[in-house]
Image: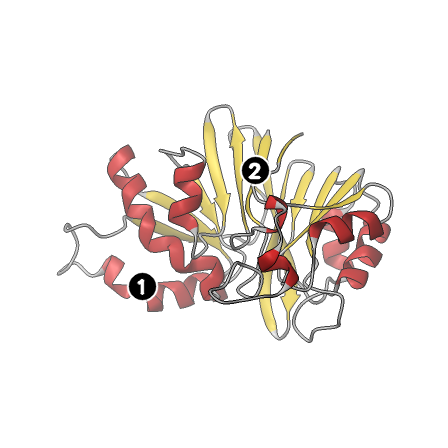
Amino acid sequence: MRITFLGTGTSDGVPMIGCKCPVCLSKDKRDKRLRASILIRDNDKNYVVDTSLDFRAQMLKEKVNRLEAVFFTHQHADHTSGIVDLRSLNFAMNRSIDCYGNKETMDILRDKYDYFFNPVQMGGGLPQVVFYHINKPMQFDGIKVVPIPIKHGVLNILGYRFNNFTYITDASFISEESFKLIGGTEILVLNGLRYRPHHTHLSLQESVNIADKVGAKKTYFTHMTHDVLHKNLEKELPKNMYPAYDGLTIEI
């Protein structure tokens, strides 16, 4: 199984017009972040977590022309708005794409994109998607996918475990029950928004504390704002913990 970080930034962590912060002025390509998402490749099958605002560019960069499924963490625009560009993959594959998330997320997306499912409009360039609620482990060929309930402020969202790889973003709290689902994972990805506390996201120190508790062989941090310069964070993190960057690919 091969995982590629399609994006590691937030809406406040991507290059912005006129911004003169250290991240935007940085010449380190690892500071040039698109919005957070990952691509999972296994036995010629492709899966993504979230369809970010940058989804089209991310798929073109990775030369993805087919997709088995999308797993949504939650309904916020920076993680879902790229869903409209699934239609290009529909054309390439000549079939619909399965999309998974918790009930709260998928119900909101169905309301927001109700025209996808409107018989009057169907058949003319609309994304062809099938929405499913995921609330228990499911098998996708050689990958066991375990949904992990997470809190994002007051929202109930999902992280996902793919075999021994766990991806969590936009978390602010992880329950003891969810820690049990994460336990034994070899590679952990956590959101580490910034150094300062935030009411709906984990700070970097909070994420480090969680990583210590999980004890994965390696932990990568994603979903970072302009507060975070890659080279600085790289020096500050404990052993076996790393800042992720766009294009980073790991094998497990």
Q: Is residue 153 above or below residue 249?
A: below
Residue type at mark 1 is Tyr
Q: Which residue is mark 2?
A: 4
Dot 2: what SS?
A: strand
**Does 60 sit left or right of 29 as displayed?**
left
Tell me what residue is drawn at x 81 percent, y 37 percent.
217
- Asked whether the beta carbons under mark 1 and mark 2 sit within 8 Å of each other, the answer is no
Residue at the spot of label 1: 113
Judge from the rendering whether residue 107 lies leftward or rightward of residue 190; answer left or right: left
Which residue shows up at 45% across the image and 46% down it? 70
Q: Position of residue 105 (x, y in %)?
A: 47, 63
In the rendered image, the quadrant that contains the N terminus is top right
User: What's the coloring here?
Assistant: secondary structure
For the residue pair 250 and 158, the one nearer the viewer reads as 250
Q: Callout 1: 10 Å neighbours few (<14), some, many (20+)?
A: some
Residue 10 location in percent, x, y? 56, 61
Q: In the image, 63: left or right of 129?
A: right
Q: Residue furthest top?
A: 43
Q: Distance of mark 1 from mark 2, alpha carbons?
A: 28 Å
The disc, 1 or 2, on the residue closer to the chain's N-terminal end is: 2
Q: What element does badge 1 sit on?
A: loop
Type of the residue with mark 2 = Thr
Q: Quadrant of residue 252?
A: top right
Q: Is residue 153 left or right of residue 62?
A: right
Nearer-the-camera pick, 29 or 177: 29
